[in-house]
Image: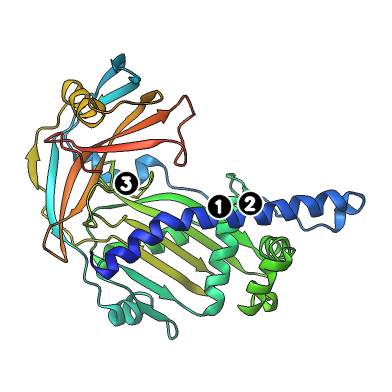
Amino acid sequence: MRPEALFWRIVMRNVKKLRRLTIIILLSIYLTSCATNDEDKNDDPTVEEISINVPSAEEQNETDMAFEEGKPEHVYINEELDENLFIDAELVLPAQKIYSYSTVLKSFDYEDVKNTILQESEGDIGGEKGSLVYHRNAKSGHLDFYCSYATEHGLISDDTALSGNDAVYKIKEIFDMLEVGGELEILDITVMNKDNLEAVKEIIMKDIEYADILTAKGYDGDIFEDDIEVYRIECALSEHGIPVFRNRPYLQQITDRFMAYPSTITVTISNEGFEEVVMTGMFEVYDEKGEEVNVIGEKEIKEAILRKFGDVILPVEYKAVNIWMEYFPLLTENSFLGVDLIPVWCIDFEIGGEKYDEENGYTLRINAVTGAEVS
């Protein structure tokens, strides 16, 4: 396996576990602190609820209007496929024509991006093929962390107070200028002002052990201007409304070959400019027509599930509870850059009666054209 492939594989497997563990520790300490200081609640840091206007699905997918219109077919499936193997899910067959595409990982001119698009006089920029990583300065990473921490803890509301439309516009403008394949989709936006940042900083620094690490990184010295506004915007790619692989749920590989990089974009912007830009799994613009393909339906999906589990003695119940389509950027074998963007059916399974989530469930991806297992 190539070193960069192994790196990405290890990162994607462990980053969520590390993040969750950190959040649990910090939140536990914060809640304990709140309980012990109940008599002096007014002195505790609070996070003001603010957020922004997120473009509607209609606004984000204007290009889809030109796509072939039709009425998708909804098929509800509820049956036992084999011993301890069930399906209880709705299958939505697309009304539009489906295509596969051939492209390559995006080759960014990093200095050109820095000088002509980001228009920043400072900062570092780089990344592997298909990736773009920009940091304006050390404090930029701090701002990104404060925002992501607040989001994970639900400290920011979904209501509107500050307008982030300008920030969203800047991201879309850069995306168009970079000429990246696919359509930009806004997933989540976090907005913070001075009060929010100071409150989150104080909450985080209550963890003595963790605070030592942050102090070494200079977090304790962070001072925020009165008028500061920070926007952290998570984006992804789609193709005619069908999401491109985002590694959610996480990829479970069936071969030693690294098959795909998640297509994700995270941008942190303040009123001083771009703080961080992280893009992964980006690919070049491809022929919009692509190659028309016929996707499999209910019968073939059931057959694919039976091929996966039919010869296995399942000790507990496996139940397919969710089926959806996504585009999977399969890295061309024996190529460092080639990408085949193929439609796949994703099937979530609940195991042993446990409600599905990314820790307790299992997701099977099958090629929506051939029915072969992808991951």
Locate the N terminus by quadrant. bottom left
The residue under the point 33% across, 70% down is 132
Mark 2 lies on residue = 24
Secondary structure state at the residue bearing disc 2 = helix
**Residue 185: % across, % down:** 35, 50
* In contact (CB < 8 Å): disc 1 and disc 2: yes
Callout 1 amino acid: Arg
Residue 69, relative to residue 257: is it above or below? above
User: Residue lying farthest top?
Assistant: 79
Q: What is the x, y in percent for residue 341?
A: 17, 50
Residue topped by disc 3: 252
Res. 100 image quadrant? top left
Q: CB under 8 Å between callouts 3 and 2?
A: no
Whole-number angstrom distance, CA of label 1 to CA of label 2: 6 Å
Q: Which residue is labeled 1 in the image?
A: 20
- Answer above or below: position of 238 versus 116: above
Report x, y in % for residue 36.
87, 52
The residue nearer to you, when weighing 306 against 139, is 306
Q: Position of residue 334 (x, y in %)?
A: 11, 62
Q: CA distance from mark 3 to mark 1?
A: 19 Å
